Image (cartoon, grey):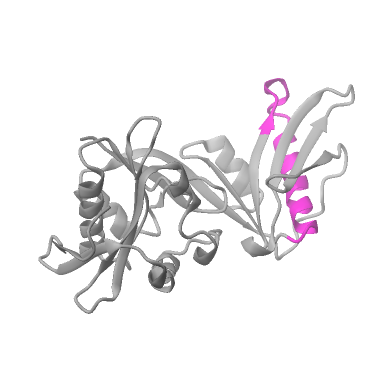
Amino acid sequence: MMEADVPVRSPGGRRLTVRPYDAGDHAAVVALIDCDWLPGQYPAALQFPPPALQQLREAEVLVMCDTGGEAAGMVCVGVRPADGAGLIVQLHGWGNFEVIAALLAAARARLGLRPLYAFTGPATATGIPGLPVEHRTVTARALTAAGFTPATAQRYFLRDLTTPPPAPPHYPLAHVTVIPDPPGWLLKLTDTDGRHTATAILRAPTPETAGMAVLWQLAVRHSHRRQHIATHLLGQCLHHAALHGARHLTADAPDGDLPATRLLTSAGFLPLDTLTVYQRRP
């Protein structure tokens, strides 16, 4: 554990103080997270401290304060048991480069000389980790300045369902099975011979997610590709989610996956950002 009120200097010489998070910081930390809110993200109050910290060793939340004692930033860190890598799960600093750089320095000091990965916590309702680099350009610049480089990236999409989708596809209709945990549905298409052709998994909207559903998976058997089956099944997913109260549907695809991008955008999904996990070698 870090000692309370450890003074640090930002790269610009600003005097900041780092100390462990306590319950009295909750409102200020939630405000920090909500300042960086991304459409499709769960409300910060519902996911802080992030559940991902429970799976790490030496997990800690650090709060950075300015000279007036106000929360200027926060960072969640820990060590991954499987390989000993240091993880920066979350980091927020009001979009201030000096504060973000100082938080990264504090995280590096806390985690020591080991491989580091930054923004390993889920960024959105999809559960996919990463920094939304287009929404948070200052943080991306601070990571680069601190020696971090992109490791993985996923393109993030959002579909508004408050306006009803076009008429739902008719034949063939997907067979729908309820999934209990997490709550949702498995949609399965078969051909006229009863052979499986494609499946999709939807995570259901809940009161906690403010009407957000997630397209968790959509896969077509290799032998049935290029037959517009994915478009057909995606149309049924849109209607099924809207029918069960979803106001928005999120999805993701590997950055650079052009077929997946074309499929989603043709169905009305908007590409919102690229969720990027960064790494730094010792």
Q: Could you tell me residue 260's position as x and y percent?
A: 58, 38
Give the quarter of the figure containing the C terminus: top left
Task: Identify the residue shown where x is 25% and y is 76%.
Answer: 69
The one of 188 and 75 positioned closer to us in this rendering: 75
Q: Quadrant of residue 135?
A: bottom left
Apparent side of residue 256 relative to residue 92 in the rendered image (left or right) = right
Residue 261 located left or right of residue 154: right
**Which residue in the rendered view is the most extreme toward the left?**
13
Q: Is residue 242 magenta?
A: yes
Which picture quadrant has residue 99?
bottom left
* Residue 175, above or below 123: above
Residue at 65% x, 46% y is 215
Residue in the picture at 29% in, 59% down = 138
Above or below — where is 157 with respect to 280?
below
Where residue 111 appears, as percent x and y from the top left, is 26, 44
Foreground of the two, 177 or 260: 177
- Is the stretch drawn in magenta largely helix, strand or loop? helix
**Left or right relative to 249: residue 19:** left
Residue farthest toward the bottom in the current orientation of the protein: 68
**Is residue 280 visible to us here?**
yes
Q: Is residue 228 visible?
A: no
Residue under the image location 19 percent in, 76 percent down:
67
Left or right: 254 with respect to 90? right
Percent coordinates x, y for residue 56 in the rendering: 41, 42
What range of the chain is rendered magenta? 219-245
In magenta stretch: residue 12? no
